[in-house]
Image: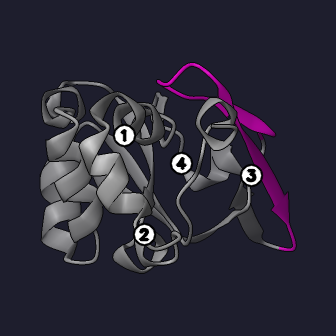
C-alpha cells in the first residue's frame, strides 16, 4: 500500500492539497509511520475558497501549515469509529467537531463525501470544504 501522500497524489483529485502539503514542508510528517487520519479537501473544495485565499496562504507558510495540520488527527480513525465520536484532536492542536446523522458525517461544516481510503500509515476521509481553525479564521 502507498502512504498518505502517495495515495492522495495518485487519487488525482487532491492536486491542490498535495501542492500545499509540499509548500508547507509537511510531506515528511505525512510519510512518517503515524498512523494519521487525514480529512482531505478535494481540488473542488479548495476552489470554493474566496479568490486569492490559496495564493496568500502559499505565501504565508506558518498559516498554511496550521490549516493543513488542522486536517490531520492522530490515529487510524475509520468510518465506523468516526460515527461514534463527536470531535477529534488535530495535529494543529485544536479540535474539529464530528457530527453523524442519517448516515452522513460532517467535520465542522464540511461533508465527508468518501470514507476509509486506506494507506499504509493511516486513513483518508474525503471532505468537500477546507477546514479553518478558529485561530486562523479570526484573522
Q: Residue furthest right?
A: 101
Q: How is the image coloured?
A: one colour
Looking at marks 2 and 3 on the same chain, the residue that comes earlier in the sequence is marked by: 2
Distance, label 4 to label 3, CA atoms, is 9 Å
Quick one: 121 or 113, which is closer to the camera?
A: 113
Is 36 placed left or right of 119 in the picture? right
| Residue 54 pos. (x, y %) | 36, 60
Residues shaded magenta = 85-102
Q: Residue at x 30, y 25 (%)?
A: 34
Give the SS element for disc 4: loop
Q: Which mark is residue 64?
A: 1
Q: Which mark is residue 83?
A: 3
Is 64 placed left or right of 136 in the picture? left
Residue 5 appearing in the image: yes
Q: Which mark is residue 77?
A: none
Distance, label 2 to label 3, CA atoms, is 25 Å
Q: Which mark is residue 46?
A: 2
Q: Nearer the viewer, mark 2 or mark 4?
A: 2
Residue 103: in magenta span: no
Looking at marks 3 and 1 on the same chain, the residue that comes earlier in the sequence is marked by: 1
Q: Residue at x 45, y 74 (%)?
A: 51
In the rendered view, would you say 18 is above or below 13? Answer: above
Give the SS element for disc 3: loop
| Residue 76 pos. (x, y %) | 45, 36
Looking at marks 2 and 1 on the same chain, the residue that comes earlier in the sequence is marked by: 2
Give the SS element for disc 1: helix
Q: Nearer the viewer, mark 3 or mark 1?
A: 1
Looking at marks 1 and 4 on the same chain, the residue that comes earlier in the sequence is marked by: 1
Distance, label 2 to label 4, CA atoms, is 24 Å
Amino acid at each position: 500500500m502507498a502512504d498518505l501522500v502517495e495515495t492522495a497524489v495518485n487519487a488525482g483529485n487532491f492536486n491542490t492539497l498535495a501542492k500545499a502539503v509540499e509548500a508547507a514542508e509537511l510531506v515528511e510528517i505525512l510519510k512518517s509511520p503515524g498512523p494519521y487520519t487525514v480529512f482531505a479537501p478535494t481540488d473542488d473544495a479548495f476552489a470554493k475558497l474566496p479568490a486569492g485565499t490559496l495564493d496568500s496562504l502559499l505565501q504565508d507558510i506558518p498559516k498554511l501549515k496550521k490549516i493543513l495540520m488542522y486536517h490531520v488527527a492522530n490515529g487510524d480513525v475509520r468510518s465506523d469509529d468516526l460515527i461514534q465520536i463527536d470531535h477529534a484532536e488535530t495535529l494543529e492542536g485544536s479540535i474539529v467537531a464530528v457530527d453523524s446523522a442519517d448516515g452522513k458525517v460532517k467535520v465542522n461544516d464540511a461533508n465527508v463525501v468518501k470514507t476509509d481510503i486506506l494507506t499504509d500509515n493511516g486513513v483518508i476521509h474525503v471532505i468537500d470544504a477546507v477546514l479553518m481553525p478558529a485561530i486562523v479564521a479570526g484573522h
